């Protein structure tokens, strides 16, 4: 377990040994967050997975070639160049399979992913046996390792990350159009094929520079997780891009720091787990599209609907009891209320409990219920809104009357005061009678007035 | 119009234009000659000959799978033509793009996309704006005006997934208005929209037509054909009939378009497909 001072040193970039790795992984996260957003919106995220697996043969072959040329064999630019070439070959194979056969995309991707990865694993084994060079450490490209990185590697990764991020902003408008509506883009004369290739090229660049720190199996997570997390927080593209870049950068920074402190864990896994925890937080708590805020909103609406159903049912019972006379607030039997709607026992019990808490119900004799004065006023209002809406639907919206009650049920609960006033005006102007007294104040409440 | 059964029966290749290109007056907004299109080796359009007159509201009507959308896409160079050509004001499409606005089918895009209605409408100006440049204030103003023209100016900043189907369709129309074109190609703008939207779209089409613009509209509802359009193209893999709406919308023509007479052509196409595979 590393000490606190170690932790601070690494996280705050004061440790020389880890500073380069942490900063480069962070930049990688920013670039992956940006490029991955477009990839996600283009619905091509999994293509990056096939691409990253297809880079492995290139790593092994580049190593063999460099050793054959008498070079060290482990120069990062050389290995990454090999990775790029075989990644592109993988994508190309995929496109050929898709365009010449009628196989679906996922089949082509699965095929390329597994076959290229197989070739890669096999050729890694072969180059391990090459005389005169140690290939040990090459397998760290699979799971990622925040191993010692020399300054020139850092510059390479930082430059590629910065350039790809810059390109994402430069082509913002073009990529947006491509991702949203490629047919329209093509009809306007935008070169959609070129833009698609450019996007894939940027994905390739990010994937390849991610090989060393995150590893080829998990680099896909770096391209997918930040944008999907960001999407939970916003409905705006610009905000999504910025958030995605920030989440990517944060995952890279924290992930690389943690993995520097716990060298026995593969770096890729740690980074992905950090990203995943940010994703989980976003999925659960993001106000715009998160799961919990949505559940809360639903619960609130359900409570509101339940209350209004109760009040309307009660009002209708009172109306029936009043006959032709004015509607009075008397007590009514619980059994009659149960008859009014199909509500389950638990549901009704819950609704009644809430109504008591909100002072819509008053104590009454056993087996009977009684609305409070505010409850009665509210009941008249709710019933009236319901009927206004029903009348409107029957009169003007061409909906079969048998469907009306259900639709009225859904909408009336969210009718605001302004909308109700508009409805009233509309119906009165068109000479439709509203079958409820126009104002609840005219209803005799049955209780002696206090004022 | 004769069905080209002889071409079908004798060989397994598609007809290739051999006759010299006929002259057409340059002011015709859309002239289509000898157009044949095949999808997955299955022909969907045969020998289309059309001259669309300027300033007309043109309805393209035909059964499902008749190739109505394909016809629009082929004119827009979105899918390759097996033979023939389509000229816009006497020029190939790639030289006349600025004269054409396109409204794709509403379902062709993902409406749960992180953009606002205004953003989508602004896309209609991207060509004018050009590479790399940001959207100017002037274009944003124009986009707001376009939204106003389709009656949803108040929804400009709303995220597009929170719009109703009819409102989404209006956004697409506003985007086409932004293109400031002479010829409008619209793919089923009336599909699954509310009555108010349908009314608004009809009014918009009439306004465009009054300004001398030409609109080609893929349409499904036979009941409204003659009230909405003044020119008709009845399509079922080939042009069954075209001309002024009142004259073209006859029982006989409809039977030819929708009835069993086309089975022969379909069977031939099917046979052709089998012979290729």
Image (spheres, coloured by chain):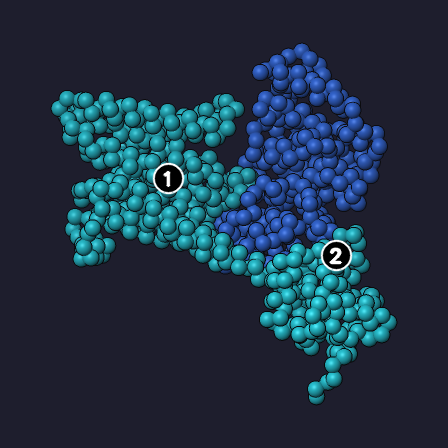
Q: Which residue is mark 1?
A: A220
Residue drawn at (35%, 32%), measured in percent from left and top? A53
Chain A, hue in figure = cyan
Tag of residue A422: none
Crowding at dot 2, Cα within 10 Å, few <14 / some 14-19 / many 20+, comes out as: some
Which residue is situated farthest in the front direction here? Answer: A366
State the image coordinates of residue B241 (x, y, percent, origin top left). 77, 30
Badge 1: chain ID: A
Q: Label 2, label 1: how many angstroms apart (C-alpha)?
A: 50 Å
Quick one: which residue is furthest to the left in this view? A132
- Residue shown at 27% from the left, 32% from the top: A81
**Residue B186 falls in which quadrant of the image?**
top right
Determine the secondary structure under disc 2: helix
Mark 2 — residue?
A: A405
Taking depth in this image into account, of B134 and B22 the one nearest to the observer is B134
Give residue B270's position: percent from left, percent from top: 66, 19
């Amino acid at each position: 377990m590393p000490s606190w001072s170690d932790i601070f040193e690494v996280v705050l970039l004061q440790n020389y040994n880890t500073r380069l790795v942490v900063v480069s992984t962070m930049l990688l996260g920013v670039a992956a967050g940006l490029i991955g957003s477009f990839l996600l919106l283009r619905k091509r995220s999994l293509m990056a997975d096939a691409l990253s697996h297809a880079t492995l043969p290139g790593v092994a072959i580049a190593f063999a070639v460099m050793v054959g040329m008498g070079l060290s064999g482990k120069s990062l630019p050389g290995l990454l160049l090999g990775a790029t070439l075989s990644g592109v070959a993988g994508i190309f194979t995929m496109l050929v399979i898709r365009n010449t056969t009628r196989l679906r995309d996922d089949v082509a991707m699965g095929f390329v992913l597994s076959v290229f990865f197989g070739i890669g694993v096999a050729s890694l084994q072969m180059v391990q046996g090459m005389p005169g060079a140690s290939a040990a450490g090459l397998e760290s490209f699979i799971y990622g390792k925040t191993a010692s990185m020399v300054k020139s590697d850092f510059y390479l990764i930082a430059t590629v990350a910065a350039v790809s991020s810059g390109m994402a902003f430069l082509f913002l408008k073009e990529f947006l159009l491509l991702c949203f509506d490629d047919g329209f883009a093509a009809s306007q004369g935008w070169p959609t094929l070129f833009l698609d290739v450019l996007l894939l090229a940027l994905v390739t660049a990010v994937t390849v520079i991610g090989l060393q720190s995150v590893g080829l199996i998990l680099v896909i997570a770096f391209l997918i997780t930040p944008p999907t997390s960001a999407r939970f927080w916003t409905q705006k593209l610009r905000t999504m891009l910025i958030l995605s870049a920030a989440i990517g950068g944060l995952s890279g920074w924290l992930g690389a720091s943690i993995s520097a402190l716990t060298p026995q864990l593969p770096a890729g896994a740690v980074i992905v787990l950090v990203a995943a925890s940010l994703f989980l937080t976003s999925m659960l708590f993001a106000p715009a599209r998160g799961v919990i805020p949505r559940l809360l909103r639903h619960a609130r609406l359900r409570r509101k609907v339940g209350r209004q159903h109760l009040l309307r049912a009660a009002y209708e019972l009172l109306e029936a009891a009043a006959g032709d006379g004015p509607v009075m607030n008397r007590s009514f039997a619980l059994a009659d209320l149960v008859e009014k709607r199909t509500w389950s026992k638990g549901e009704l019990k819950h609704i009644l409990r809430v109504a008591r808490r909100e002072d819509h119900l008053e104590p009454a004799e056993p087996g009977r219920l009684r609305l409070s004065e505010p409850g009665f006023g509210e009941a008249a209002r709710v019933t009236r809104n319901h009927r206004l809406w029903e009348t409107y639907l029957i009169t003007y919206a061409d909906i079969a009357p048998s469907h009306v009650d259900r639709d009225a049920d859904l909408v009336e609960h969210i009718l605001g005061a302004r909308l109700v006033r508009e409805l009233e005006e509309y119906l009165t102007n068109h000479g439709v009678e509203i079958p409820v007294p126009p104002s609840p104040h005219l209803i005799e409440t049955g209780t002696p007035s206090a004022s | 119009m004769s069905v080209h059964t002889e071409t079908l029966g004798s060989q397994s290749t598609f007809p290739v234009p051999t006759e010299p290109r006929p002259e057409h007056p340059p002011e015709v907004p859309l002239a289509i000659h000898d157009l044949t299109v095949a999808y997955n080796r299955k022909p969907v359009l045969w020998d289309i000959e059309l001259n669309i007159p300027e300033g007309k509201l043109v309805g393209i009507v035909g059964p499902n799978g008749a190739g109505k959308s394909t016809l629009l896409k082929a004119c827009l160079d979105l899918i390759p033509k097996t033979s023939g050509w389509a000229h816009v004001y006497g020029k190939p499409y790639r030289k006349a793009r600025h004269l054409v606005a396109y409204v794709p089918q509403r379902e062709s895009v993902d409406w749960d996309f992180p953009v606002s209605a205004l953003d989508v409408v602004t896309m209609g100006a991207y060509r004018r704006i050009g590479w790399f440049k940001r959207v100017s204030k002037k274009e944003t103003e124009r986009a707001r005006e376009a939204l106003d023209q389709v009656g949803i100016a108040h929804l400009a900043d709303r995220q597009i997934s929170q719009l109703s189907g009819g409102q989404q369709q209006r956004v697409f129309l506003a985007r086409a208005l932004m293109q400031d074109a002479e010829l409008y190609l619209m793919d089923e703008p009336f599909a699954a929209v509310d009555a108010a939207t349908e009314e608004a779209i009809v009014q918009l089409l009439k306004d465009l037509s009054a300004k001398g613009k030409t609109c080609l509209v893929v349409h499904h509802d036979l009941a409204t054909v003659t009230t909405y359009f003044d020119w008709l193209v009845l399509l079922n893999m080939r042009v069954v009939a075209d001309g002024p709406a009142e004259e073209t919308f006859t029982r006989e023509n409809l039977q030819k378009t929708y009835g069993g007479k086309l089975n022969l052509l379909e069977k031939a196409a099917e046979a052709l497909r089998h012979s290729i595979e």
